[in-house]
Amino acid sequence: MDADTIAERAPKLPPAWFKHAFWRTHRLLHRVSGGRFLWTPQAKRGWGAMRLTTTGRRSGKPRTVIVGYLEDVFTPVVLAMNGWDDGHPAWWLNLEANPEAVIKVKGGPERQVRARRVVGPERDRLWQMWAAVDEGLDAYAAGRSVETPVVVFEPRPPA
């Protein structure tokens, strides 16, 4: 199937302002609820919600977002897809500048991690994991002018 056919099959996305407002609201609910608004990949969605704190590439200040993730054994896997809008999300640009971060998944402690963009066969395998829970994945990705980074979060080695 060619890229034009895939793009034609892309489900209609809500406007960017709505997607960004949804995630801001989710982050606020997470903060005021003490983290009860995270879910695990075992939920009926097939993927989980994880709190990710990066260091701002310009400000040097902590920046926290909620991102969707899958687990590859015990390693969280995230797509840096910016709500399927074009371009990369700020959190990914922050991780490119400084890959050290802190994550929190439901039921687990905060973890010090290092982000790594995967490539080649590893990326293909993890992309297929995501495609198994998001049937529109290829169509959404085809609508972007940049490749969607697949990011894994590995334990940070001791200092």
Image: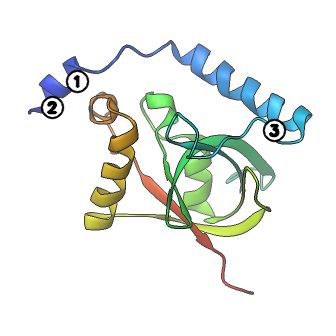
Which residue is nearer to you in this view: 60 or 75? 75
Q: For numbered disc 1, what is the local secondary structure? A: helix
Per the model, the C-alpha gap separating discs 3 and 2 is: 39 Å
Pinpoint residue 140: horizontal percent, then vertical percent: 34, 29
Left or right of 2, for residue 111? right
Question: Which of the image's four quarters has the C terminus?
Answer: bottom right
Pinpoint residue 82: horizontal percent, then vertical percent: 51, 35
Residues packed near mark 2 inside 10 Å, few (<14), some (14 to 19) or many (20 plus)? few
Which badge, 3 or 1, comes first in the chain's sequence? 1
Left or right of 19, for residue 57? right
Q: Determine which residue is flagged by label 2.
A: 3
Q: Which mark is residue 36?
A: 3
Q: Quadrant of residue 123?
A: bottom left
Above or below — where is 13 with respect to 148?
Answer: above
Above or below — where is 112 with respect to 83?
Answer: below
Identity of the residue drawn at 27% across and 36% down: 138
Residues packed near mark 3 inside 10 Å, few (<14), some (14 to 19) or many (20 plus)? few
